[in-house]
Amino acid sequence: MEANSQVIFATAVFLLSYAIIISEKIHRTVVALFGAMLVIIGGILHQEKAVESIDFNTIGLLVGMMIIVGIARNSGLFEYLAVRAAKQSKGDPVKIMVSLSVITAVLSAFLDNVTTVLLIVPITFSIAKALEVNPMPILLGEVLSSNIGGTATLIGDPPNIMIGSATGLGFMDFVINLTPVIIVIMLVTVFLLKIIYRKQLVTREELKKNIMNMNPNDEIRDAVLLKKSLFVIALTIGGFLVHQYVHLESATIALGGAALLLLLTRDEPEHALAAVEWPVIFFFVGLFILVGALEHVGVIEWVAKESLKLTGGAILPTGMLILWLSAIASAFIDNIPFVATMIPLIQDMGRLGGISDLNPLWWSLSLGACLGGNGTIIGASANVVVAGMAEKRGFKWTFVGFMKVAFPLMLVSIVISTVYLYFFYLT
């Protein structure tokens, strides 16, 4: 196939795959894998080159953390935290919304945010039922918080995992550079949610007593497993804190923690591996190959050159463009394929534009892509998962209904990010 034909074919396959993923007519994993096979069969990439384009550090980190959480969830740890937070809130629905949102944000910083909402949401329905309040405001707080909290660390959200793996930025780099602004965004978001829903989240005093009668200890199903899980989680997070200083990849830390927990619990490997979200893993595999094809034929480099013409290669306009483009785009399309495309684009922009320090652009991409997912119900995987769980229980979010509250809150978070980046990184 001639060079021009390769460019057209690779671009067409990528754009068509992207369009079908957005439409949600076919499962995104199927689309990504089929698109990946097309670029290999079409001769754009040889199989060896396609395998080289897969970021196995990202894959390993995801698999390792999924195994750890999959085993730990059987202890009842996460249900314990939710019930304890509800009791600490004295049964007040607004305070419960705040406390569960904070717990969700903290857990999402250290665990996959989709897994976090899967663990927190069921107990949220139980608490809302006991208080006879609409669970949807509380769920919205948890959804927004999962995406906000996930932005704070390397392992909290897939876009950060991908950025860290591609750039060599470590766990502490993300904590030092992103956690301060995320704390501010979280405080502002929770404050605004309290104002928006304070009149809706009202219950009777006798119903508050139902919450106070709940015993968090009853949620612990396996105390021995709980101790082992906490030990390994603490050890793994400690590993993340020092991994760049001891020259170990984050995937090695995560898979090492998973192997240790399997050894300590003697859990059957097939049970542990069943906790891995394999459709997500193979979605990443297909996606990396699709983007690798675009890199190979020079499409990414061309887009980088055009972007540099628009911004003049100056760090301030380039950073702002990446932040706001990422935020708006990620509100309407899955942020994972978007970030997969943006990473080589930013790398080429740095090389072609002579930008020596790309870190401000990586922070712009992370904040825009992760926080932008809060804009609509389809903006992030956690949003879709919680919406589906709510619908099964008879509660439904419309696209517009979710967006009416979530999109303005997302814009507030991006404005705060803009100010933060402007004063600390882009000037």
Image: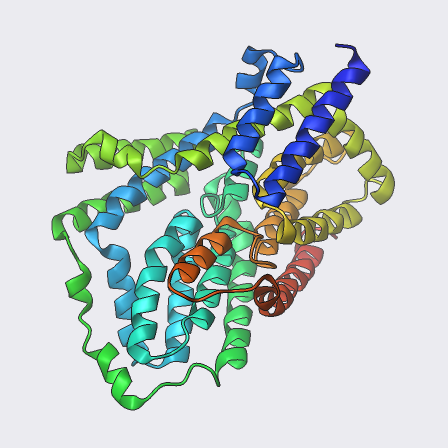
Foreground of the two, 154 or 38: 38
Q: Quadrant of residue 402?
A: bottom right
Q: Is residue 335 above or below residue 133?
A: above
Residue sticking out furthest to the bottom:
205
Q: Residue at x 82, y 32 (%)?
A: 305
Q: Is residue 133 left or right of residue 311?
A: left
Q: Position of residue 22 (x, y in %)?
A: 62, 44
Give the colour scheme of this rendering.
Answer: rainbow
Q: Residue at x 73, y 27 (%)?
A: 11
Quadrant for the N terminus in the image: top right
Q: Is residue 65 above or below residue 178?
A: above
Q: Is residue 164 left or right of residue 129?
A: right
**Is residue 230 visible from the viewing direction of this image?**
no
Q: Position of residue 222 (x, y in %)?
A: 14, 51
Q: Is residue 75 left or right of residue 202?
A: left
**Is residue 108 visible from the viewing direction of this image?**
yes
Foreground of the two, 404 or 364: 404
Q: Residue at x 38, y 29 (%)?
A: 252
Q: Position of residue 51 (x, y in %)?
A: 53, 18
Foreground of the two, 16 or 141: 16
Q: Quadrant of residue 69?
A: top left
Q: Position of residue 426 (x, y in %)?
A: 72, 51
Q: Is residue 21 above or below residue 47?
A: below
Foreground of the two, 209 or 136: 136
How many numbered badges does the structure rendering display? 0
